[in-house]
Structure formats: C-alpha cells, structure tokens
Image (cartoon, helix red, strand yellow):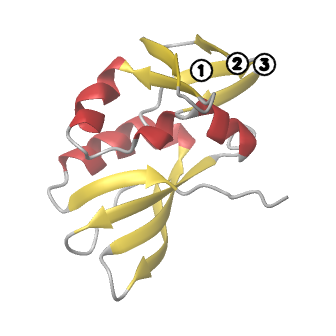
Amino acid sequence: MAQFTLINGDVIEFSNNIVKPLNCTGSQSRDRFGHIFFIPDAAVPFIDAGKLAKDLFNVSKLALAKYHDSKTVLPVLIKHQKPLQAIDGLTIKRQFKIISFSSANIEKSQAASVFKKLLTDPAVDHVKLDEVKQLC
C-alpha cells in the first residue's frame, strides 16, 4: 500500500482502489470516471465553499502523479487576490504576474499548519492540485 499525506495533514494508505485512513475520518467515493476520492471530514466545508478543489482529494490522481509520501512536498496552485504572505512550509515556485495565481509546494511534514493558514488567509480564493499530466 502506498501512503499519502493529504493537504490537510491527514494520512491515508491506498491500494487496489481502497483507501485506509490512518489518522483521520472521512468518506471514500468514486466518480463516474472511476476515480477514487477520500474527503476528510475537516475539508468538506471548504470544498463546499469553493476554497478547496475536490481534486486535492482525488487519490487516483495523486497515485497516478506519484505524489505518495516518498515525495516530501505536495504541489498546489493557489488563486489569490494579493501577494501571499510567507507561510512556513509553503514554498512559492512561481507567482504569475498577469493573474493572481501562484504555483507552490507544501511540505507534507507541515501540511496541517499550512492548510490552516491558507484557509484563514482572506487573500486566498482557491487552492487546487498542481497535477502532472501523463501523455500516452
């Protein structure tokens, strides 16, 4: 089983389309394309409010992009109204000049605290997965 640290710091294992939560509660679901999601209870209100993209919890995509815990960071895209404040555990890779969008990495060891700071920052509009696209 591969282990994944989610953006909110929750840790799960994933194998054979089955999610095993290690330190959290949430719900597993499958979309019409067969993708497996694990939505932690703590993330539901932020997904519903549009602040978090559901794709952050698409375990199928996380596995396909090899974002398991052998990698120490989770790449995200952050839409914001003004430049982001410095947050320990968040490294801005690129801040786009024309639009208020940044590409960043979240240190998985600090994911829980980064998650809280991003969601309480009024400048942050939306956070989504910066996913690797596989071309055949």
| Of labels 2 and 1, the one closer to you | 2
| Of labels 3 and 2, the one closer to you | 2
In three-dimensional space, the C-alpha distance between marks 3 and 2, rounded to whole angstroms, equals: 10 Å
Q: Is residue 78 left or right of residue 12?
A: left
> Secondary structure under badge 2?
loop
> Secondary structure under badge 1?
strand
Task: Name the quadrant containing residue 79.
Answer: bottom left
- Residue 49 visible within the image: yes
Checking the image for residue 17, the label placed there is 2
Q: Is residue 95 left or right of residue 131?
A: left
- Which residue is label 1 attached to? 12
Q: Earlier in the sequence, mark 3 or mark 1?
A: 3
Q: Categorize mark 2 by other alpha carbons within 10 Å: few (<14), some (14-19), many (20+).
A: some
User: On the rendered image, what quadrant is the C terminus found in?
Assistant: bottom right
Checking the image for residue 1, the label placed there is 3
**Residue 132: x and y, percent?**
67, 57
Against 63, residue 96 (above or below) is below
**Residue 95: x and y, percent?**
41, 78
- Residue 85 visible within the image: no
* Amino acid, disc 2: Asn
In three-dimensional space, the C-alpha distance between marks 3 and 1, rounded to whole angstroms, equals: 10 Å
Q: Earlier in the sequence, mark 2 or mark 1?
A: 1
Q: Earlier in the sequence, mark 3 or mark 2?
A: 3
